[in-house]
Amino acid sequence: MAAKDVATNPALASLHDIQTPAAIGAWPFAAGYWFMMVLMIIVLLTLFVYLRKRHQHSAAKRSALMALAALNTHTPNYIAQVNEILKRAALSYCHRDSIARLSGQHWYDWLAAQVKQPPTALCEQLQLGYQPITLTDAQAQTLKRHASTWLKQALPLKNKSRELQAANTEAN
């Protein structure tokens, strides 16, 4: 039938067969896709670096919480050990000169300055370390809970201005 049409219409003889386009492949991507891939890689790398630094920055806090959890409440110097854990955690985030010399009321003031709500119960229980009494199990558990709460709320320290302000008020 096609030969018959060509014979009757000579214009059809100059036509070629229909050329189908090549199959659409996955490569190469358009420029917009490359831009989005590069952008996603940058975002993922930035997120990874941020989370890694955050994890490393809070390592002292996690270590202090684990040491506090592992602490035996029946040891004779339990209050001193809790105080030591708090001071060691604070030293991890502050300059040694401003924290190591603090003791007594200055240390309690510094602890209170690091959180929104002052830990008066924690400070009162830490003061019991200077008295010749032993803690009951309930008091020891309460001290552990208050110390843990302080560690979770205060660390890592939000800004160094609190530290400097507390050190300046201690010096005055």
Image (spheres, rainbow, N blue to C red):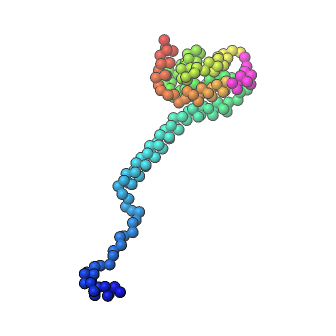
Q: Is residue 105 magenta?
A: no
The image shows residue 12 at horizontal and vertical percentages of 27, 81
Task: Let me know if residue 126 appears in the view.
Answer: no
Residue 19 lies in what quarter of the image?
bottom left
* Residue nearer the viewer, 60 or 144: 144
Q: Which residues are magenta?
A: 133-142
Badge count: 0
**Residue beneath the point at 46% across and 46% down:** 44
* Residue nearer the viewer, 116 or 131: 116
Q: Is residue 20 left or right of residue 67?
A: left
The image shows residue 107 at horizontal and vertical percentages of 57, 18
**Residue beneath the point at 40% across and 65% down:** 25
Depicted 63 relative to depicted 127: above or below: below
**Residue beneath the point at 49% across and 25% down:** 95
Task: Let me know if residue 108 appears in the view.
Answer: yes
What secondary structure is the magenta-colored segment mainly? helix
Q: Is residue 24 left or right of residue 118?
A: left
Residue 78 lies in what quarter of the image?
top right
